[in-house]
């Protein structure tokens, strides 16, 4: 057989091990996989000597800010950043304008994204107190990869769910094996702590962090676990920040609850004291914790407590953020992060904190299974899409604005050095990123629906 491309001399990494191998690509699919190169021909041969070949990252946690807020970010820039970061499929969250809460808004978002993405992409649906009667239709009649809900205030365009609405939506999803993804924080506790800080006249960055204590997250996680037990529904708990939260989820799994944890690169990079230096440019929610917790998060990641990693990429303009320099309460929540996510975790591999196999599991294999994209995505095996990233584990460099592909002109990661970087990204067999350059026009990426 002749191939369109052959990847040779690289070390192929899966969740189950690694080996020197050859990958043959034909018509956008992995057509051949072997440990030794046979006498095959290809139009292009990519020599990956000394490098590692991973299945492309599936980033299930992106806020593209598009449509509706494209002064902050847009599909073209966001997916270029993904490609540069080794991500081959990204999934958009539903807090756009219009918010994705029914079939019409889902289709409108599909139309808005058509012919604009560098990489493949999916779209999450949304659940609020106002669309309980449309949840089943949204899940059954679209390719939505999940139903996203907030248990606390986030943005006015996307109201959070009170307990009754949450329970009702979980009941509906349980009938159809639907997946809920949840931002878990207790809104009442947050409001109480905010008022306390503001009554003391505090406007400093650390006051924001202290207003969202770990107990607000833990209580909400426990509450939703109880509802999952009662409804039989399944859920992924997003951006878990704490070791205690991960342990609560693990205990629930052990008694048969269908619940899993996602976490994000910033919880493995920053600690609460970093707020003093970076202020509003490190304002996001839930907030990061202390250094002891950060190190414990790495340990639990390596031990299998985390199902998926997602970037929670959510850029705002510098002007929107800088108003928080004098008053932290005025700045919006969110940071860019999709381009740097993989390097954060590759750096952890180099530091001996986690295995490369585990990173492949949580960045590709598990997200594909969780979001209904497997076996088309998330694996290096014949028949799967040829979505691959080649990484140089010895490459060490500082992340800067010149490297970034996002529309955001700032990042809390700028100025930090990481060892381990993606140097080439392929989406369905096409090289979309190569050593700093985007290689395709916007529109190469396809919409990917959840497999029924």
Image (tube, rainbow, N blue to C red):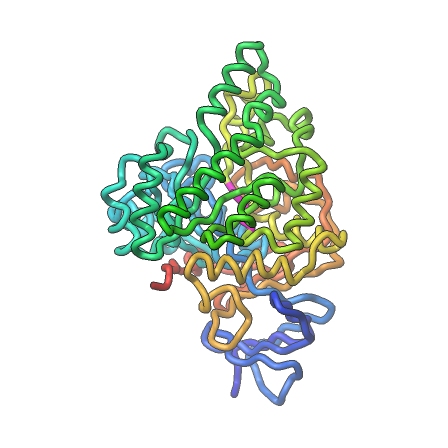
Residue 123 visible in this rendered orientation of the protein: no
Q: Position of residue 269 (x, y in %)?
A: 67, 41
Q: Is the stretch drawn in magenta largely helix, strand or loop?
A: loop
Instruction: Name the quadrant of the C terminus.
Output: bottom left
The tally of labels here is 0
Q: Position of residue 156 (x, y in %)?
A: 37, 29
At a point 59% along the width and 63% down the height, the residue shown is: 389
Q: Answer whether residue 146 is magenta in the image.
A: no
Relative to 110, 25 lies left or right:
right
- Image-quadrant location for residue 131: top left
Q: Is residue 231 above or below residue 434?
A: above
Relative to 123, 205 lies left or right:
right
At a point 41% along the width and 57% down the height, the residue shown is: 443
Q: Position of residue 223 (x, y in %)?
A: 45, 38
Q: Nearer the viewer, residue 20 or 218?
A: 218
Q: Farthest residue toward the front?
A: 255
At a point 38% along the width and 51% down the height, the residue shown is: 233
Q: Nearer the viewer, residue 356 or 57?
A: 356
- Image-quadrant location for residue 22: bottom right
Q: Give, as a single range, the part of the protein colored magenta.
A: 309-313
Q: Position of residue 241 (x, y in %)?
A: 58, 39
At a point 43% along the width and 55% down the height, the residue shown is: 121
Q: Is residue 418 above or below residue 163?
A: below
Q: Is residue 376 above or below residue 99?
A: below
Residue 223 visible in this rendered orientation of the protein: yes
- Image-quadrant location for residue 292: top right
Q: Nearer the viewer, residue 48 or 384?
A: 384
Relative to 321, 350 lies left or right:
right
């Amino acid at each position: 057989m002749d191939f369109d491309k052959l990847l040779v001399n690289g070390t192929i990494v899966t969740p189950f091990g690694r080996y020197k191998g050859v990958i043959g690509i034909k018509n956008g699919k992995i057509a051949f996989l072997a440990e030794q190169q046979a006498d095959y021909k290809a139009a292009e041969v990519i020599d990956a000597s000394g490098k590692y070949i991973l299945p492309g990252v599936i980033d299930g946690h992106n806020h593209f800010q598009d449509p509706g807020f494209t002064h902050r970010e847009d599909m073209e820039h966001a997916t270029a950043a993904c490609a540069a970061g080794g991500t081959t499929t990204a999934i958009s969250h539903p807090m756009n304008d219009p918010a994705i809460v029914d079939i019409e808004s889902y289709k409108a978002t599909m139309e808005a994204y058509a012919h604009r993405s560098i990489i493949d992409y999916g779209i999450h649906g949304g659940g609020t107190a106002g669309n309980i009667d449309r949840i089943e239709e949204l899940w059954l009649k679209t390719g939505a990869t999940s139903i996203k809900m907030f248990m606390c205030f986030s943005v006015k365009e996307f109201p959070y769910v009170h307990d009754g609405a949450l329970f009702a939506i979980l009941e509906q999803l349980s009938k159809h094996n639907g997946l809920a993804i949840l931002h878990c924080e207790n809104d009442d506790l947050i409001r109480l702590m905010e008022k306390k800080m503001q009554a003391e006249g505090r406007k400093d960055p650390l006051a924001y962090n202290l207003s969202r204590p770990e107990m607000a997250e833990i209580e909400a996680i426990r509450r939703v676990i109880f509802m999952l037990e009662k409804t039989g529904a399944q859920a992924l708990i997003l951006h878990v920040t704490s070791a205690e939260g991960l342990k609560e989820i693990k205990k629930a799994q052990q008694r048969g609850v269908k619940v899993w944890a996602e976490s994000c690169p910033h919880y493995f990079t920053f600690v609460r004291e970093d707020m003093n230096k970076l202020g509003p440019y490190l304002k996001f929610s839930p907030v990061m914790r202390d250094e002891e917790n950060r190190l414990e998060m790495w340990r639990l990641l390596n031990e299998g407590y985390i199902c998926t990693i997602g970037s929670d990429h959510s850029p705002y303009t510098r002007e929107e953020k800088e108003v928080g320099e004098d008053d932290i309460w005025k700045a919006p929540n969110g940071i860019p992060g999709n381009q740097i996510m993989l390097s954060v975790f590759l750096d952890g591999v180099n530091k001996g904190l986690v295995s490369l196999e585990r990173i492949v599991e949580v960045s590709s294999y598990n997200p594909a299974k969780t979001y209904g994209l497997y076996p088309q995505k998330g694996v290096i095996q014949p028949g799967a899409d040829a979505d691959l990233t080649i990484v140089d584990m010895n490459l060490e460099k500082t992340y800067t604005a010149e490297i970034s592909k996002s529309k955001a002109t700032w990042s809390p990661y700028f100025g930090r050095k990481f060892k381990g970087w993606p140097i080439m990204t392929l989406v369905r067999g096409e090289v979309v990123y190569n050593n700093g350059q985007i290689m395709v026009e916007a529109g190469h990426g396809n919409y990917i629906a959840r497999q029924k």
